[in-house]
Amino acid sequence: MLIVGIAGGTGSGKTTVVRRLIEMLPPGEVVILPQDSYYKDNSHITIEERQKINFDHPDAVEFTLLMSHLAEMRAGRPIEMPVYSYLTCLRSKETIPVQPAEVVVVEGILVLVDPGLRSMLDIKVFVDADADDRLGRVIQRDIVERGRSVLQVLARYNETVKPSHLQFIEPSKRYADIIIPGGAENTVGIEVLKTIIEKHL
């Protein structure tokens, strides 16, 4: 099994890179574990407190569960992946059964931040993008998918997204084996990554 970590700032194009990668590789050979599924359950705090959670901070992620799931899959055992809702900031009671595959892609903004998780990754990728481009994508996504207003998105960006990016995500780029500038527009970068994964397959 090959475990590939794909990190990068919010709105850098990570998810699109992963999607392109899956389209280029044989069907059924790749499974995705999104870091977003492993945000901690916040049912013990009030709705008001949940609205203030900084999802761009490593403390928001249950890395121990993610690592134990990766270890299970590496041992050939299926896992029950959590389902997380951004609207309620809670974990669902339902889980998604995931079978081990030849390639497991762990995708998320903080994937290269945690030393324990980093040590489990065979290939570490950082999708790099201009801050203005990322902000534009974040505004679009948060309005459509998360029901936020432009003012809410900008306030959150300035209060948590930008400071956390500078403190945690940008510095984690130095651990990457491959940096893909320009996100999904960089077809050469994605092709290089695909070739490395194909060699393993």
Image (tube, rainbow, N blue to C red):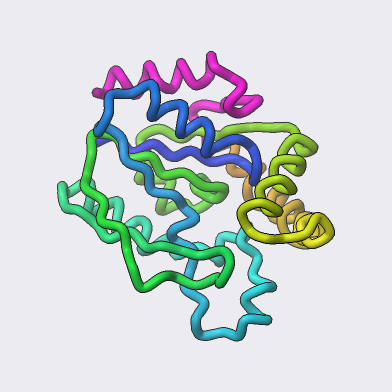
Residue drawn at x 65%, y 65% is 54
- Considering the image in quadrants, where does the C terminus appear? top left
- Considering the image in quadrants, where does the N terminus appear? top left
Q: Is residue 72 left or right of residue 67?
A: left
Q: Nearer the viewer, residue 184 or 144?
A: 144
Q: Quadrant of residue 63?
A: bottom left
Q: Is residue 51 left or right of residue 33?
A: right
Q: Is residue 190 magenta?
A: yes
- Number of numbered tags placed on the structure image: 0
Residue 14 in picture, x, y percent from top left: 55, 37
Q: Quadrant of residue 91?
A: bottom left
| Main secondary structure found in the magenta portion | helix
Q: Nearer the viewer, residue 108 or 75?
A: 108
Residue 81 in picture, x, y percent from top left: 33, 59
Give the residues in magenta. 176-201
Residue 112 in picture, x, y percent from top left: 51, 45
Q: Residue furthest left?
A: 76
Q: Is residue 29 magenta?
A: no
Above or below residue 179? Residue 40 is below
Residue drawn at x 44%, y 61% is 38
Q: Nearer the viewer, residue 15 or 9?
A: 15
Residue 67 in picture, x, y percent from top left: 35, 56
Above or below residue 49? Residue 16 is above
Q: Is residue 111 left or right of residue 83?
A: right
Residue drawn at x 75%, y 52% is 162
Residue drawn at x 76%, y 40% is 136
